[in-house]
Amino acid sequence: MRWFMATFISLLLLATASFAAMDIESPHWSNPYQSAQAVEIGDTINFTAYWTDDVALDTAWLQMNWTLAGNPMPSYSNIQSVQVSGTSATTRFSVTVPAGIPAGTAVGWKIWMLDGTTKSNTTTAMSFTTKDTQPPTLLSIAQSSDTGMPNKTITISLNATDNAGLSKARLVITDEKGTKDYSIRSLSGASAQIMFNYTVPWSFTPGTSITWLVYVTDMNGNTVATPTKTINLPACPDFCAPNIPPGGCMDWGQCNIGNETRTCFNCGVETSFQCVATTQNRACPLEVTRTEAERSISAAETAVNEANDAKKNVTLALASLEAARNAASSGSWGTAKLQADKAKALADTALPLPPPPWPMLQLIVIVIIIVVLFLLWKLGLLKELYNKLFKRKKEGSEEELLEEQEQAENEQKEGEEEEKPYELPEELKEELERNTNEEEKT
C-alpha cells in the first residue's frame, strides 16, 4: 500500500511538471472596463478585465500614465497589484484621482497579467478624462473684531481645501467710497490657512459699516466666496442737545455790546465720536446813547490811570482808549462804548511792567571790577600799579610847587619895579640944572 501511494505521488508530480513544461500560451484578456469616461478630481474610478490561462494565473498589475505636479509619470507605471489564482479570474482595481492633475487631462491605463510560468500579457490601453467642477471648500471664517476704530487693524482668517489644488484668495472690501480688491494672496496645495490684515481708514462717516468677503479659486478656475461679513463703525449720538443733531447749531443769543454768540456741536473721528460744543461769534448793530458812551470812556480813563500808577503795562489799553475817543468825536457812540469797555478790560487785566535791567547790570560791573582787582593783587601787579601812580602824583606836585614859587617871585619883582620912582637920565638932569640956573640969573 505504501509503495502504491509513493508511486502515485511521484507519477502525479511528474505529470504536473510535464504539463507545465507544455505551457506555451500567455494569459488571455477580455472585456476591459472603466466606470466613467470623465472623472472629477478627488473621485474614484474603477477598472476591471477578465483573464484566462491554460496553466494558472498569478499576479495582475494596474498601469497608468498620469502626471502629477512635481511627480511626472509620462510613461506607464505600476500603480496597484493584485494576486489571482486558477485559470480564470476577473481583476478589479479602484483609483482616486489625486489633486494636482489639471482638469481635462487624458489619463491612460491598462492591466498587465503574469501567469505561473512567467508568461504575461497586457490589455489594450484605455483612457479617461479628468474634470474639476467643484469649487474649494471654506471653513472657520472669522474676523478679530466686529467693531472698527480709525486706523485699527482687523485680522480676517479662514481655511480652504480643494481636491484639485488651491490657486489664490482675494479680499474684497466695500465701504462708503465703493468696492475694491484690498489684497490678493497666492495659494498652493490641497489646503491652506488664509489670513488678511485689514486697516480701517482714518476718516469715515460715523455710523456707517464696512463689508468684506473673500473669493478663493482653485487651480482649475473654480471659485467660491465667503458669506458677506460686516465691520460696524462707531456712531455719534442722534442729538447733542435737545433737537440739535451733530453738526447743528443753536439760535443766536442777544446782542451784547456789538457781539452775539451761539453754540454749535461737532461729532466724529476727531472728537472720538463724542459731542463737542464750540462757540461762534458775530458782530451785531449797537444802539448806544452819547451818555452811555461818555460814561464808558470816563470809566476806561480811570482804569487806565490807576493801572499806569500801579506800574502796569497799559499800551493796549491806551490804544483802545484812543480809538474810543476818536469814535466819540465822530459821533459813533456804539463804537466808542465798545472800544472804551475794551480799554477798561485791558487795563483791569494789565500785567506789571518788568523791572529795569540797570541795577542788575551795575551789580555785574561791580563784581567784574572786584574780580579784576583781586586778580591784580594776587599777581602782585596792584602794588606796582599803586606805586607808579603815587610816585607820579608826588613828582607832579613838586613841579607845580616850583612853578608857583617862580611865578610868585616874578610877580614880586614886577611889583618892586612899579614902586620905584622914575629917575631922569643924567643928560636930562644936567640940562634941567642948566636951565634952572639961567632962570635964576635972569
Image (tube, rainbow, N blue to C red):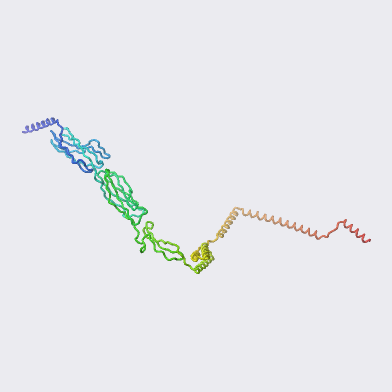
Residue 242: % across, % down:
36, 64
Q: Nearer the viewer, residue 287 or 55?
A: 287
Q: Is residue 95 above or below residue 202?
A: above
Residue at the far front: name it: 331
Q: State the image coordinates of residue 304 (x, y, percent, origin top left).
A: 52, 65
The x, y position of residue 310, in whole percent, is 53, 65
Query: For this rendering, which residue is in front, 80 or 73?
Result: 73
**Where on the picture, by quarter, is residue 33?**
top left
Residue at position x 33%, y 55% from top?
Answer: 208
- Residue lying furthest right: 441
391 left or right of 12?
right
Quadrant into which the C terminus falls: bottom right
Counting every numbered tag in the picture gives: 0
Query: In this rendering, does residue 312 appear at all?
Result: no
Q: Quadrant of the N terminus?
A: top left
Residue 115 vertical placement versus 158 (above, below):
above
Left or right of 225 in this view: 270: right
Q: In the figure, is residue 308 to the left or right of 196?
A: right
> Is residue 99 visible in the rendered structure shown here?
yes
Q: Please, which residue is most extreme toward the left here?
A: 1
As rendered, which of 295 and 42 lies closer to the eye? Answer: 295
Q: Is residue 344 left or right of residue 33?
A: right
Q: Does residue 112 sit above or below 382 in this rendering? A: above
- Tell me where residue 273 sits by quadrant: bottom left
